Protein backbone atom coordinates (compact mmCIF):
# COMPACT_ATOMS: atom_id res chain seq x y z
CA UNK A 1 0.00 0.00 0.00
CA UNK A 2 1.27 3.48 -0.85
CA UNK A 3 0.00 6.92 -0.03
CA UNK A 4 0.91 10.39 -1.16
CA UNK A 5 3.35 12.11 1.13
CA UNK A 6 2.50 15.51 2.55
CA UNK A 7 5.49 17.75 1.77
CA UNK A 8 6.18 21.05 3.48
CA UNK A 9 9.00 23.52 3.07
CA UNK A 10 11.71 24.99 5.27
CA UNK A 11 13.58 28.17 4.34
CA UNK A 12 16.63 29.02 6.43
CA UNK A 13 17.58 32.69 6.63
CA UNK A 14 19.51 32.87 9.91
CA UNK A 15 23.02 32.91 8.48
CA UNK A 16 25.30 35.80 9.37
CA UNK A 17 25.72 37.00 5.75
CA UNK A 18 29.35 37.84 6.53
CA UNK A 19 30.54 37.84 2.95
CA UNK A 20 27.53 39.79 1.69
CA UNK A 21 27.90 42.46 4.37
CA UNK A 22 24.14 42.86 4.90
CA UNK A 23 21.21 40.50 5.58
CA UNK A 24 20.49 38.47 2.45
CA UNK A 25 16.82 37.99 3.35
CA UNK A 26 16.23 41.71 2.73
CA UNK A 27 18.08 42.02 -0.59
CA UNK A 28 15.88 43.51 -3.34
CA UNK A 29 15.41 41.17 -6.27
CA UNK A 30 13.18 42.46 -9.02
CA UNK A 31 9.90 43.60 -7.48
CA UNK A 32 10.39 41.62 -4.26
CA UNK A 33 12.91 40.84 -1.56
CA UNK A 34 15.01 37.70 -1.65
CA UNK A 35 13.40 35.78 1.22
CA UNK A 36 9.80 36.44 0.10
CA UNK A 37 10.82 35.46 -3.44
CA UNK A 38 12.12 32.05 -2.36
CA UNK A 39 9.08 31.53 -0.12
CA UNK A 40 6.76 32.40 -3.03
CA UNK A 41 8.45 29.99 -5.41
CA UNK A 42 8.47 27.18 -2.87
CA UNK A 43 4.88 27.73 -1.74
CA UNK A 44 3.67 27.01 -5.27
CA UNK A 45 4.99 23.46 -4.81
CA UNK A 46 4.78 22.54 -1.10
CA UNK A 47 2.81 23.58 1.96
CA UNK A 48 3.07 24.56 4.74
CA UNK A 49 6.19 26.72 4.68
CA UNK A 50 8.28 27.42 7.78
CA UNK A 51 10.93 30.16 7.78
CA UNK A 52 13.75 29.74 10.28
CA UNK A 53 15.52 32.91 11.43
CA UNK A 54 18.29 33.63 13.93
CA UNK A 55 17.17 34.19 17.56
CA UNK A 56 16.60 37.96 17.34
CA UNK A 57 16.41 38.35 13.57
CA UNK A 58 13.69 40.39 11.90
CA UNK A 59 12.45 39.07 8.58
CA UNK A 60 10.63 40.81 5.72
CA UNK A 61 6.84 40.66 5.61
CA UNK A 62 5.61 37.23 4.56
CA UNK A 63 2.19 35.73 3.79
CA UNK A 64 0.19 35.11 6.97
CA UNK A 65 0.17 31.34 6.46
CA UNK A 66 3.98 31.21 6.63
CA UNK A 67 5.21 30.35 10.12
CA UNK A 68 8.40 32.03 11.33
CA UNK A 69 10.42 30.22 13.99
CA UNK A 70 13.84 30.93 15.43
CA UNK A 71 17.01 28.97 16.07
CA UNK A 72 17.45 28.06 19.73
CA UNK A 73 21.10 29.08 19.51
CA UNK A 74 22.81 31.43 17.07
CA UNK A 75 25.71 30.54 14.82
CA UNK A 76 25.38 26.75 14.88
CA UNK A 77 24.87 26.32 11.15
CA UNK A 78 22.19 24.68 9.02
CA UNK A 79 21.57 21.72 11.34
CA UNK A 80 20.29 24.13 13.99
CA UNK A 81 17.87 25.65 11.50
CA UNK A 82 16.85 22.27 10.21
CA UNK A 83 16.00 21.15 13.75
CA UNK A 84 13.78 24.19 14.27
CA UNK A 85 12.06 23.81 10.91
CA UNK A 86 11.41 20.08 11.20
CA UNK A 87 10.13 20.53 14.75
CA UNK A 88 7.64 23.14 13.55
CA UNK A 89 6.38 20.78 10.83
CA UNK A 90 5.77 17.81 13.12
CA UNK A 91 2.15 16.75 12.71
CA UNK A 92 1.75 19.03 9.69
CA UNK A 93 3.81 17.26 7.00
CA UNK A 94 5.55 13.95 6.39
CA UNK A 95 8.67 15.52 4.87
CA UNK A 96 10.04 18.89 3.84
CA UNK A 97 12.15 20.44 1.12
CA UNK A 98 14.81 22.52 2.88
CA UNK A 99 16.25 25.60 1.19
CA UNK A 100 18.42 28.56 1.99
CA UNK A 101 16.96 32.02 1.38
CA UNK A 102 19.59 33.06 -1.17
CA UNK A 103 18.62 30.94 -4.19
CA UNK A 104 16.74 33.42 -6.39
CA UNK A 105 16.63 31.08 -9.37
CA UNK A 106 15.06 28.11 -7.56
CA UNK A 107 13.26 25.95 -10.16
CA UNK A 108 9.96 24.23 -9.24
CA UNK A 109 10.79 21.25 -11.45
CA UNK A 110 14.01 20.70 -9.49
CA UNK A 111 12.13 20.63 -6.18
CA UNK A 112 9.51 18.24 -7.57
CA UNK A 113 12.18 15.93 -8.94
CA UNK A 114 13.86 15.57 -5.54
CA UNK A 115 10.51 14.96 -3.87
CA UNK A 116 9.74 12.26 -6.42
CA UNK A 117 13.10 10.60 -5.72
CA UNK A 118 12.67 10.46 -1.94
CA UNK A 119 10.94 7.07 -2.10
CA UNK A 120 11.39 5.12 1.15
CA UNK A 121 14.51 7.06 2.14
CA UNK A 122 14.73 9.44 5.10
CA UNK A 123 16.71 12.04 3.15
CA UNK A 124 17.11 12.82 -0.56
CA UNK A 125 20.08 15.11 -1.22
CA UNK A 126 21.60 16.26 -4.51
CA UNK A 127 25.29 15.88 -5.24
CA UNK A 128 26.71 17.87 -8.14
CA UNK A 129 30.37 17.38 -8.82
CA UNK A 130 31.94 16.54 -5.47
CA UNK A 131 29.55 18.69 -3.41
CA UNK A 132 26.45 17.65 -1.49
CA UNK A 133 23.73 20.30 -1.16
CA UNK A 134 21.99 19.84 2.20
CA UNK A 135 19.99 23.06 1.73
CA UNK A 136 18.44 21.79 -1.48
CA UNK A 137 17.29 18.47 -0.08
CA UNK A 138 14.21 16.64 1.16
CA UNK A 139 14.02 15.39 4.76
CA UNK A 140 11.41 13.26 6.47
CA UNK A 141 10.19 15.08 9.55
CA UNK A 142 11.13 12.23 11.89
CA UNK A 143 14.87 12.72 11.24
CA UNK A 144 14.65 15.69 13.61
CA UNK A 145 15.58 13.34 16.47
CA UNK A 146 18.82 12.44 14.70
CA UNK A 147 19.49 16.12 14.01
CA UNK A 148 19.07 16.99 17.68
CA UNK A 149 21.39 14.16 18.66
CA UNK A 150 24.09 15.49 16.34
CA UNK A 151 23.66 18.98 17.76
CA UNK A 152 23.98 17.63 21.31
CA UNK A 153 27.21 15.91 20.25
CA UNK A 154 28.47 19.13 18.62
CA UNK A 155 28.65 17.36 15.26
CA UNK A 156 27.48 20.25 13.11
CA UNK A 157 28.07 19.05 9.55
CA UNK A 158 24.92 17.92 7.70
CA UNK A 159 27.00 15.13 6.16
CA UNK A 160 26.95 13.40 9.55
CA UNK A 161 23.17 13.13 9.27
CA UNK A 162 23.46 11.40 5.91
CA UNK A 163 25.52 8.68 7.57
CA UNK A 164 22.96 8.26 10.37
CA UNK A 165 19.75 7.75 8.37
CA UNK A 166 18.85 6.10 5.03
CA UNK A 167 19.91 8.74 2.52
CA UNK A 168 19.50 8.82 -1.23
CA UNK A 169 22.28 10.80 -2.89
CA UNK A 170 21.08 12.07 -6.26
CA UNK A 171 23.78 12.63 -8.85
CA UNK A 172 23.74 15.39 -11.45
CA UNK A 173 22.64 13.16 -14.32
CA UNK A 174 19.39 12.42 -12.47
CA UNK A 175 18.60 16.11 -12.05
CA UNK A 176 19.82 17.83 -15.19
CA UNK A 177 16.53 17.52 -17.08
CA UNK A 178 14.68 19.30 -14.27
CA UNK A 179 17.18 22.17 -14.07
CA UNK A 180 19.68 22.12 -16.96
CA UNK A 181 21.84 24.91 -15.56
CA UNK A 182 21.47 23.85 -11.90
CA UNK A 183 20.30 27.38 -11.18
CA UNK A 184 18.42 26.05 -8.14
CA UNK A 185 21.79 25.47 -6.48
CA UNK A 186 23.15 28.93 -7.21
CA UNK A 187 23.60 30.93 -4.02
CA UNK A 188 24.38 34.63 -3.82
CA UNK A 189 27.02 34.92 -1.11
CA UNK A 190 28.89 38.09 -2.09
CA UNK A 191 28.00 41.52 -3.49
CA UNK A 192 29.56 40.45 -6.79
CA UNK A 193 27.41 37.32 -7.01
CA UNK A 194 24.33 39.37 -6.10
CA UNK A 195 24.99 41.91 -8.84
CA UNK A 196 25.60 39.14 -11.37
CA UNK A 197 22.30 37.51 -10.40
CA UNK A 198 20.46 40.82 -10.81
CA UNK A 199 21.87 41.16 -14.31
CA UNK A 200 20.52 37.72 -15.15
CA UNK A 201 17.12 38.25 -13.58
CA UNK A 202 15.30 38.80 -16.85
CA UNK A 203 17.33 36.33 -18.87
CA UNK A 204 15.89 32.85 -19.47
CA UNK A 205 17.90 29.87 -18.34
CA UNK A 206 20.13 28.54 -21.11
CA UNK A 207 19.85 24.85 -21.91
CA UNK A 208 23.07 22.91 -21.52
Image (spheres, helix red, strand yellow):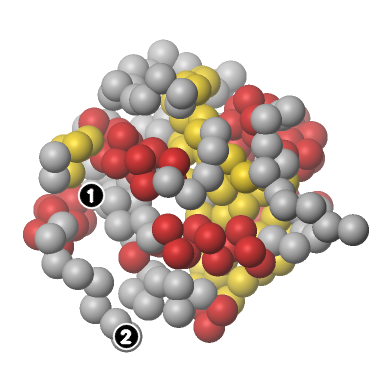
State which quarter of the image contains the N terminus: bottom right
Does the rendering let one see residue 85? yes
Label 2, secondary structure: give it. Answer: loop
How far apart are the two marked residues, 2 and 1, measured between alpha carbons?
25 Å
Residue beneath the point at 17% across and 44% down = 29
Give the residue drawn at x 79%, y 34%.
145
**Which residue of the protein is positioned furthest toward the top in this rendering?**
56
Residue 17 is at least partly visible in this image: no
Image-based side of 17 in relation to 118, left or right: left
**Mark 1 falls on what kind of element?**
loop
Expressed as whole percent of the image width and height from the top left, the position of residue 9 reads 54, 41
Q: In the rendered view of the protein, which quadrant contains the C terminus?
A: bottom left
Image check: 103 left or right of 150?
left
Q: Position of residue 190 (x, y in %)?
A: 23, 49
Q: State the mark number for residue 4.
A: none
State the residue in front, 187 or 113.
Answer: 113
Q: Earlier in the sequence, mark 2 or mark 1?
A: 1
Q: Nearer the viewer, residue 119 or 99?
A: 119
Instruction: Write down the residue under mark 2.
Output: 208
Residue where numbered disc 1 is placed: 190
Amino acid sequence: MTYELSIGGIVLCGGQSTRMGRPKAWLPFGQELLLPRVVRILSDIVKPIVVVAAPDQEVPPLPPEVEVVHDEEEGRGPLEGLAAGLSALQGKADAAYASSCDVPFLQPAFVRRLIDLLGHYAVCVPKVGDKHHPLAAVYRVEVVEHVRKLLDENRMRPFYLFAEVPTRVVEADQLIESDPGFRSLRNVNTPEEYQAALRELDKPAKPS
